[in-house]
Structures are given as structure tokens and as C-alpha cells.
Amino acid sequence: MKVEILAITPDAEKLIEKAGRTCYLSFDKITEDSTEKFIRMLVKSGHESVLEHAYATFRISGGSRAFTHQIVRHRLCSFSQQSQRYVDEKGFEVVTPHSIEKNKEAKSLFDNFIKNAKDTYMRLQSMGIRKEDARFVLPNAVESEIVISANFREWRHVLKERCDKSAQWEIREIALEILLTLKKHAPLIFEDFEIDKVEKTVSIKKR
Amino acid sequence: MKVEILAITPDAEKLIEKAGRTCYLSFDKITEDSTEKFIRMLVKSGHESVLEHAYATFRISGGSRAFTHQIVRHRLCSFSQQSQRYVDEKGFEVVTPHSIEKNKEAKSLFDNFIKNAKDTYMRLQSMGIRKEDARFVLPNAVESEIVISANFREWRHVLKERCDKSAQWEIREIALEILLTLKKHAPLIFEDFEIDKVEKTVSIKKR
Amino acid sequence: MKVEILAITPDAEKLIEKAGRTCYLSFDKITEDSTEKFIRMLVKSGHESVLEHAYATFRISGGSRAFTHQIVRHRLCSFSQQSQRYVDEKGFEVVTPHSIEKNKEAKSLFDNFIKNAKDTYMRLQSMGIRKEDARFVLPNAVESEIVISANFREWRHVLKERCDKSAQWEIREIALEILLTLKKHAPLIFEDFEIDKVEKTVSIKKR
Amino acid sequence: MKVEILAITPDAEKLIEKAGRTCYLSFDKITEDSTEKFIRMLVKSGHESVLEHAYATFRISGGSRAFTHQIVRHRLCSFSQQSQRYVDEKGFEVVTPHSIEKNKEAKSLFDNFIKNAKDTYMRLQSMGIRKEDARFVLPNAVESEIVISANFREWRHVLKERCDKSAQWEIREIALEILLTLKKHAPLIFEDFEIDKVEKTVSIKKR
């Protein structure tokens, strides 16, 4: 699985301050180090609509269709996803769950099944079945590339839900990668997201 | 596949007239037969926001995960979907594409593959793999129940996109069933959706 | 100010149970009194998306343009509002803030100003200025009728924000009226919204 | 009135191509001049969801509250607006409609009314009335600063609606300024928006 940032609002935190101060016409309070205090105040007081002015786009490669079916439920994100109707999937890769990976017997069963799936997919096509129908045999494990854009308020929401310990492991691993990248580019916005590196979960620190 | 209406705004067309006349404070023009003219005017002039006041909920049973992964991309709809993390899928049913159904060789190949998928899913569970990981072998063909709510403006949008001849056959068949039901309950709102019964497609008649 | 319910999903709480049980395929657990427990579980666990299947529409008469400019910021609601471009406002009514109402001197000043506004509006029209330009003199106090629809999840959000003690008094009074009506029709959904009748505010009781 | 661009996705058109080609996994077709053809294909075929990956933020100064009450109805935009609850408006500026500006008698009446509004606003405050209540006398003409962000698909929608000849003159003038700026930064995305400089309207050229 690979998470790559494709685009992010330049000087996002400064922009958020400039936009947010419109509500109070308090532009005279902008100084070299006013951003930190201002953004902390926004988050603490729950005035998160201002965070919508910054935006980031990620490409996720090597996630499964199980993952994509979950992530596209976030309705304030924008998605462009590899289409199984248009893309020939004969060379598909799969995501193998950790619990299967480390269980020798399960791994062998899983691998054989995946071979059967690939074989069935190709044979159906050779019998004249179109891609959009042959794909009915493709399992959830099949990888699907997806590009996701969202504003920072929505990223905070998605990451809060999906880095939580109750989230499914695959979407949590991807969400954690996204969070690490966003923390580099906009540390103030995501500073209350505290990562537990051992458990690979996140908790939100009340400020 | 089965489409069942679970709820719809009572007297939806009358409600839309009552709401829409708020813009012009023209309540004095409401008569026994004013609704027809008013709704035609709304649709013709593109003033579709008024259609958002009416709402309908459907249960779709017997659609595939290929279908659900498409339909949940409609971000103005609300969804409750059968969860493959929580529901044991050992007795899953599948959707067989027509092109496979009518090709004897393909059908036999497909059926054998589905048997293998079911068998693999159950054996993984018996090896201690949890449902949320065993489901990685479940193919797109597996049925998934879903409840969908949307307002009438959004239903018009979804049905326009998904009853179109370029839409994938399964989602188009389901969309057509939804349209037939909505036409019964709110004939004026959907009267410009003209169904071609032979081709099973819809075209929008300009009014 | 008058709040009138125009439409609401019939048997809303039963519908929410039927939709929500789709996630777990637990329809066999539906009994005469299962709804209460199920809805409490949804709200407690934060699984609020299921609440989106129920919907309610209100007409608000006698709210000011100050109120409507605030309420239309709720982007998951649907609105039909009296248009100052199309409706002749020569007989407009106004909302007088309580603080002005009970201050004799302020009240007299306010009333005279409103008279001037109405007079100016009409004289501009008599000079050939169109409604859409004459309305530039209309003050925030002018009443504006509006119809609002939203699903129950969104109503919970709007009412939480707008019944809070930090909310502006007019929108809070209107929100409280909406809440009282919704509590009648869907008591379980809104049972954690506890009204302080003296302070006219609401707090959410953690369940 | 002043329209200032605060932020825009860097290399927006290249990003849209990179994101859009994910659907077809056709990255090998990216060349120095492939963007033009790709984006024209997206717009022509109505595959506009890909345009959501690019984003732009504008500050609008010197628009009236009549304008802001209209623009905030666009629910896929993000807004930060000067608050009349928190900002002291005693020095407010106004927008004077052209029809009033060029009618000497109307202009004189309008100016006197605005003076009365300002005077009343300040006197109410001196009587102990708080800003949030004194603002009830502020007319629609009062200027209100606003920052607006939206993705390119939504900007296309907003500008199509608001540059149309049926749009109100103030919002149309502002929309035209935004369009001119976006055409500089992302000419391909907005090339089908053809400006009639005499009429100050826009028509969409079918490609």
C-alpha cells in the first residue's frame, strides 16, 4: 500500500488565518506568530468551518476494494477510482490480510483461491464475456487505485473515524499514512491527533 | 432483485407546491388543480431546489456488491448497507450477469468459482480467520442488501444518470424499478422521464 | 414567529429501525418494543447515519432576515425562501428584538426608523426603481418566510448548535419550537435533548 | 467591489489529468500536451467529478448583504463571512444599485436613508442595545466581506448560474470577476464559458 500526496493548498495555515479573521475583521492582529494561537482557538472552540478553505489530494495505491467501498462512503470527499468496467484486471494484485498472511494453511488456501479467481476472470473474457461482467468474480481483495481530495475539516473528520481503534485494520493503516503526511504539511491543524505508534491508533487530545 | 418502497412523503406533490409558493408568496393561487401547472413550471425552469422537500426511501435486495459500490458514490443519498464485517456471509447469494447466464460454458465456470469462493470463505473462518478478513475472498457478485433515501431532486438526478443507456445493466435495472415506483407515487415530478420498455432505458423529455 | 410542521416521515422511528437493521441483517429481532432499545443504541454509539432515513419539513413565518441569513448556512438542509427580488415588500412586517422592545426610548427610535425604511422603499419604487434594487434599503429586521426540510440526523445537528446558550436569541427561539414539535413526533430520536424551560436552552444528555 | 484570489491548487490542470487517468489507469498516455485533450474530453462527456480535485479560494470585499444572502445558498462552497454579531458596524459602507446611482432624486433619498440607518444603529448602541440587536436596523445595502472556497466543478456550477443573464446584477458582476481570474489560472477548465463583454453575461459553448 502506498500513500502519495498529489496536491495541497500552499501556506495552508496562513490561508486559514487570513480567511478566519474575516469573521471578526481582525486582520490587524496578524503577526509572524499569530497563526498558531488563532488555529488553536478555532479548533478548541469548534469553529471548524474555517478549516474548509485548505484542501489536500492523495493517491492511494494498493488498497483493496474492501477498503475503497468503505472510504467512498465519506460524502464530503471527492474520488477518482480505477474502474473495473473499463480497466482490464487480468493482472490484478491483491491485498492479503495480516491474519491470513501469518497463518500458513490459510495463506495457501487464500493464494489458491486468488489464482482461481484470476484464471476464471481470464477464461470468462476468452469466452466472450465483457470486462464489466467478468469482474463479478473479482474478490474484495483485488487492489484498486483511488485519488481522494478533501478539505481539512473533512480530513479531520475522516481521520478521526478511521484512525480509531474500532476502525478496520486496512483503512486504519491507510488513514494513519495520510495523517502522518498532513502533520508534516499542516502541523497545527492536526496537532491534537496523537498517534499511538505501538497500537497504530489515534486519539484526539482535548485542548 | 427486489425493490421495495419503505417510506415516501405523504401528499408529496401538494407539499412541493406549498413550499415552492413561499418564494413568491403566491399561496392564493393554490386551487384543486394548480399543482400540475406549478410543478411543470418548476421543472421546466430548472427551479429544482423545491423538489428537495419530498423524500423517499427504498430497500434494494438482491443487488450485487458491484452495484452497491457504484450506488454509494451518490453523495446526496443516505445509505444503510449490510455489513460484511458484521454479518456472517456463509450463506451468500450471488447475482449472475445475463451474459454469463445464457452462455452454458461460462455459467458452469462461474458456478464452480462461486462454490469455491463460498467454500474458501467458510474454511478460512474455521481456521480462525475473522469475518472481516475472510470476506477478502468474497466476489463482486455477492448480494448485499441496502436501504437508500433521497429527496426527489436527487432521485431525479440519480435516475437520469443510472437509467441512461450508458449505465451498467444491473444498476440500470434497479434504477428502472425505482423510477416505476416513484412514477406511481409522484407522477408529475417524474412525468418527463420516458421509459423505453424494449431497450429498458429512459430519456428525459424537454418540457 | 410561527413554526408549523408541513410533513414528516410516517412511523419514522419504526422506519429507522427497519433501515438500521439492514447493516446487521437482524430483522428477526424486531418486536413490538424493540425500537426503543435499537434507537438508543444507534445514538449512543454514534451510528447516526441511520437517522438520515427520516425527514421533516417546517414552515417558519415571522422570522427576520437576520435569522434566515444564519439558518441557510446549514448546508444539509433544503430551503425555499420568500424572495425579495420577486415579492413586493411594501407591507413588510418586522421582528423587534426584546432588548429594544423593553427599552422605551430605543423602541421609539426603532419604530421611526422602520417607518422611514418602509417609506423609502415605496418612494424608490414610485421613482421607477425595481423591487430588486429598492430592497437594498430593507433592514435585517424585515420578516421573511422560509420552508426548511432536513433529515433527522441533520435536525439533531442544527438543533444542537442553535438551541445552545451561545446561539443568538431569535434562532434559538425558533430552534426550540422545532425541537418541541419533533419531540412529539419522534420522542426517542430527540429524548437526549433536555430543555431548560427557564433559560430556554438545551443540553444534550449523554446516554 | 473587489475580488481577490487567495489560493488555488498549483498546476491544477495537470493534477486533474493525473487524477482522472486513475479511472482508466492510462498514465502512459500523459505527454507534454495531453492535458488539453483530456480535460476537453472530461467536460464534453460530463465526467465532471474529476474537476473536484482542484480548488480555489476568493476574498470578496464590498459586496452587499443582499449578495451574501444569495451566495451562501451554494451548499458545496465553504464560507467565512464578516459577522454582524461580533463586528461593530458603526463605520459601515454600502453598495448603491446602479439604477439608484443614476437617478438623482432616488440617490438623494437613498443617501439620506443610509445616514438615518447609521445614526439609528449608533444611537441604539449608546442606549445599551448590543451589536447583535442593533444590527436589526442595518439594511441589505451594507457591505459584508466574505471568503469563498470551492472545487472547480462547483465553481463551474456557481458561475454558470450566476453569470447568466437572469442572475441579479450584483452577484453577476462578482461572478464575472471570479470567472476572469479562474480563466487565467485554469484556461482549459473554463474555456467553454464565453463572456459577452457588452452584456456582461456568459454563455456555455457546447464542445
Image: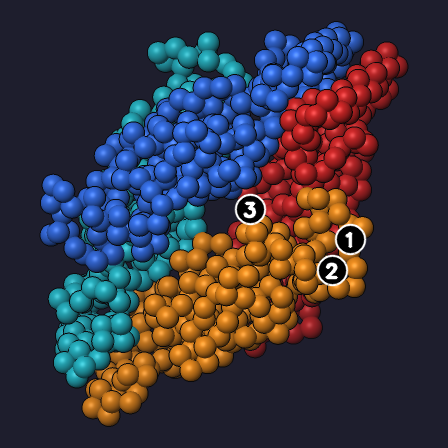
Chain colours: A blue, B red, C orange, D cyan
- Image check: A12 left or right of A25? right
**Disc 3: which residue:** B76
Which dot, 2 or 3, sits closer to the camera? 2
Residue sitting at x 36%, y 29%: A180
Q: Amino acid at mark 1?
A: Lys
Q: Secondary structure at mark 1?
A: helix
Residue B79 placement (x, y as % from top left) = 63, 45
Which dot, 3 or 1, sits closer to the camera? 1
Is the same chain shared between marks 3 and 1?
no
Q: Which of the two discs, 1 and 2, labels the residue nearer the N terminus?
A: 1
* Residue neighbourhood size for the residue with mark 3, other residues' Cα within 10 Å, grouped as few (<14), some (14–19), many (≥20): some
Question: Residue B33's image quarter?
Answer: bottom right
Q: Nearer the viewer, residue A184 or D22?
A: A184
The residues tagged by marks 2 and 3 sit, at their Cα atoms, a distance apart of 29 Å
Residue sitting at x 42%, y 12%: D30
Q: Amino acid at mark 3?
A: Leu
Question: Residue C125's image quarter?
Answer: bottom left
Q: Is residue C187 above or below residue B191?
A: below
Label for residue C29? 1
